[in-house]
Image (tube, helix red, strand yellow):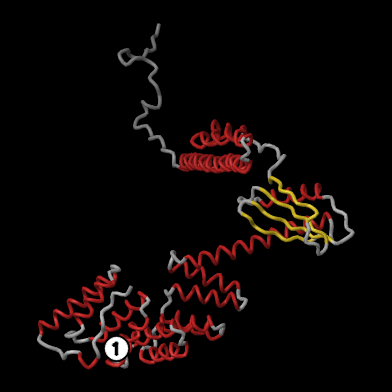
Amino acid sequence: MSTSLKLKPPERLKPPGLWWHHQEARYRYRQGLTLSRQGAYGAAIAKFSRALCHHPQPTAILVARGLIHLQQGDLPTALADLDRAIALDPTHSKAYGNRGLIRAQLGDEAGALDDWQTALVHRPGYAEARYNRGLLFANQKNYAIALTEFDQALDANPNLAEAYLHRGNVRSEMGDRDGATKDWQLALLNDLSLDAAKHRLLALHRESQDHRITQRLQHALNDHNHSLTLHIERQGPQLNLYIHRARGIAINYQKLSQVLQTELIRLDLGWVERFHIIGRMGDSGLADWDRVYRLYENQPCPPAHWRLALITTFLLFPPFGIPALLYASQINTLYRKGHYQAAISASKTVRWIYWISVWIAGLIAAVVVSYGIWLLLKNNMAPTKASPLPATTSELIPLLFPETSAPPRNQSF
């Protein structure tokens, strides 16, 4: 139920009064804006109505109040407020823009386009008006005109996430998948909460993945029998495989299931736990084969890589050895409990830890060897210190006799 008050006719708007009346009206207007941002629309409308009599710019109040009526779904009252605003100020671009929204919701698409065009005349860089025109043309399937409008809206405001979203939708309808993908990504870059862009990108990713799966499985079927055609369908963790064969063509579904199982395991699809084969002959609606298989049924246990874990622990990089041993110890347990995919993931993790440890150990060894070579070169290139020359001959020729004894004399007989 609408809480809006009954509006006074334009001719009963009071002329500007005293200064304090102006200040009070401005204060009520600011209160109304705050309440509208808080979602208290009834109280906001009351504040706007009280401020309308003496505010020096009643057009802004009428536009704000009309926007609240529009958000509440009271389109006739909102239209009346905006009509009065345009009557007071025929150049108010925001009034034309919001009235265009109301007319579009009332089904008057021509009137909406006229209002948005008039808003652009008074404000050429009005990105929202361009965006709304593009959205309306897109709904009418006038994709070329819509694309032009979205381009101009984004030229005026490159951060308008909704314009990227709907331009991507238009490009998708026109067959430009790459352009659509880029636009949806740009929409998320500007607004991560835009769920529509997320859903579009997710659907596109799934479509691309399904095409790749179909090609791989069809190639495997061609190696088995060229007359078989395949169509896939997702159903939660199950992949439904619809196989069609021509009349008179014999097929061994048991062998075919093994071929498909091997190819699906090679694809390494994390979300697939089972696959369902539905075989049909010709145009018959009845299935001549209908069976569900577990994807990893009868598969051997993944290797635990104990040797790699021990080498990591004792030789390469001990800090990584502990998690490698923990993952290696879980592989057999996960396999026995039927969690084959988790066992494969644990086995791959052990190998990943081993190769990371090899890289770290090699880096450390390279640093140590490089430092040793640097020290060796430094010592070899250092100049040798020359020995000083002796100051006297006594340091060069040792004494043959003690200093206290005189040298022997020649004695004559």
Quadrant assignment for the N terminus: bottom left
331 versus 206 height, above or below: above
145 versus 187 height, above or below: below
Image point (75%, 60%), residue name: 230
Question: Who is closer to the viewer here, 309 or 341?
Answer: 341
Question: Who is closer to the viewer here, 285 or 160?
Answer: 285
Q: Residue furthest top?
A: 413
* Count of labels in the image: 1
Give left or right: position of 248 versus 1: right
**Amino acid at pointer 1:** Ala
Q: Position of residue 392 (x, y in %)?
A: 35, 30
Q: Position of residue 14 (x, y in %)?
A: 17, 90
Q: Residue furthest right?
A: 248
402 versus 207 height, above or below: above
41 versus 56 height, above or below: above
Image point (60%, 75%), residue name: 176
| Residue on which the image places disc 1 | 85
Question: Who is closer to the viewer here, 373 or 286?
Answer: 286
Q: Residue furthest front?
A: 1
Image point (54%, 74%), residue name: 168
Q: Residues within 10 Å of mark 1 (few under 14, many from 20)?
A: many
Give left or right: position of 12 versus 80: left
Quadrant of res 69: bottom left
Q: Position of residue 133 (x, y in %)?
A: 46, 84
Q: Position of residue 315 (x, y in %)?
A: 55, 32
Give left or right: position of 234 versus 138: right
Question: Who is closer to the viewer here, 153 or 296?
Answer: 296
Quadrant assignment for the C terminus: top left
Q: Secondary structure at mark 1?
A: helix
